[in-house]
Image (cartoon, helix red, strand yellow):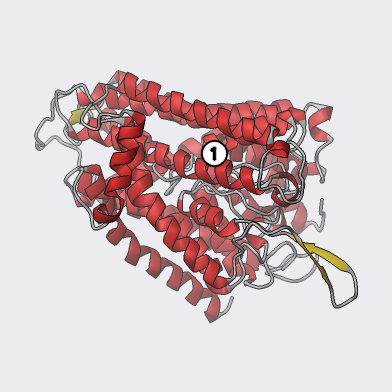
Amino acid sequence: MKLSDLSQIFVYVFALVLLAPWLAEFISQLFFGQRTLLHPVFERLEKWLYRVCKIDPKEEMNWKDYCIALLIFNFLGFAFVFVLQITQNFLPLNPQNLPRVSWHSALNTAISFMTNTNWQGYAGESTMSYFTQALGLTVQNFLSAASGVAVFFALTRGLIRKSQGSLGNFWVDLTRTTVYLLLPLSILFSIVLVGQGVVQNFSPYVSVKTLEGATQVLPMGPAASQIAIKQLGTNGGGFFNANSAHPFENPTPLSNFLQMLAILLLPAALVLAYGKMVGARSQGWTLFAVMFLVWFLSLVFSMAAEFQTNPNFNLGSLMEGKETRFGVTNSLIWSTATTVASNGSVNAMHASLSPSAGGLAIFNIMLGEVIFGGVGAGMYGMLLYVFLTVFLAGLMVGRSPEYLGKKIEAPEIKMAILGILGPCAVILVGAAISVDLPLATASLANKGPHGFSEILYAFTSAAGNNGSAFAGLNANTPYFNLMLGLVMLVGRFVVIIPSLAIAGHLVSKKISPPSTGTFASDTPLFGILLIAVIVIVGALTFLRALSLGPLVEHFLMLQKQVF
């Protein structure tokens, strides 16, 4: 490891810690309905949307109405993207005359982009028309991310409001998040990416002669606009099949750095905004410290594993499957950032990581995508762990558990357990079924523990709404498209619905003032307990599965066996 490797990590961390608090202030203003510096520019658009959609921004919803509105809206988005794909051969902006997408791939992709997963079993440049990419996938990237933020806002209101029954208005939260936060940032980021050389056009593909005299077809398209929101909205996926390893998606070291930064920027800012929203910045910084520490340890252990000498080659930091333009360190910063967030974009193939580094990428997702996590989704997922930690701490000291003055009782804990263990269950059940079915194992590129890791990663990524893949698994089959589509739905909504139910329970409760018996939730001790609960739940749930994949492969690698 060189000094340049350490400097890359330092600059990344410095930029994240510098920008996140500034953006957090802006997000908290949106949450409280205050005017921001962008209101003079976008306020007319916001009001126009309310008028066209006949929305009363002053009307509030209880948790059931809020949940129903979210589910209906997401279903409409799913249906729209599905129809676009199966009719794209009749629609405009298809200069390559790409055919309609198969029904099972279209179904999987529509679910994927609705749930903020962006799992892609297809190659974008040979499957999706410009019309489908721009009007379907890019738009859904905005709306799925905004839906996650809306749920986080609703849960936060449940904590800070007392003796009420409403959690705000889903349509207002969705609109304000999109219009004032995601849209301006994406416009700015798109312009920067275009300046770095990311393609943004509607031209037909270009045929060129290579230096060897062969003909190569260069894909074109409106890529920059989709890449900006895929990173900022922790959507992931890629406009092209090679994702952010493609030079037209990620052409320069600066574009690579900015895309890596964008993956964690909004999730980190939302954590700090939470502190201001609940009236105690220390709450936000405590959660930020927990998330940062777990992510940083994952990066450190991944670096140690990747730079370790591989006995099969007597070399460390192998470049196979890595991005040769950016090096191993940038590949590892990206792999850890994209798996602790529900982003899923990649600039290197995770299957090419050392077994330990690849196993850490899987484990990051298995933790529930709560270490920063998706935009909004990471925070409402983390709060489920906070409730569980507060409850366990209360049991240990024999006091009634409280969080921010609200009593955490049986209904909240039941919903929290459902939200935490629901995705875990579908990961293990889905992987167990698949390794025993010939039509599933026929899609594997590798046998042995590495092949098992391919399947385990696929179901983990789907349940965690991450979207990255271990590579090598041909998932564009009816079986995997349907199975993984079902897992994505469970992974998304088995967390959202309990979170909103908890918000509905909490918002009606009184806020008790802190006393000498109150267990503080903004201290290092609470942070340590929270990390322990997160890691123990993950370890106890997935240790056996990880033992059959990355752990076994690591020890076999030391015996010079490869798969």
Where in the figure is residue 55, as x and y percent of width and height? 30, 29
Horizontally, residue 527 falls left or right of residue 476, namely left
Q: Residue placed at 46% from the left, 59% from the top?
A: 262
Where in the figure is residue 162, as x and y percent of width and height? 14, 28
Residue 397 position by quadrant: top left
Residue at label 1? 465
Q: State the residue in front, 460 or 31.
A: 31
Where in the figure is residue 398, as x and y percent of width and height? 22, 27
The kind of residue tagged 1 is Asn
Q: State the residue in front, 230 or 493.
A: 230
Q: State the residue in front, 460 or 42.
A: 42
Q: Is residue 10 visible?
A: yes
Q: From this viewpoint, which residue is outermost toward the bottom?
A: 3
As displayed, is residue 216 above or below residue 502? below
Q: Is residue 529 visible?
A: no
Bin the neighbour count of mark 1 within 10 Å (Cα to Cα): few under 14, some 14-19, many 20 and up: many
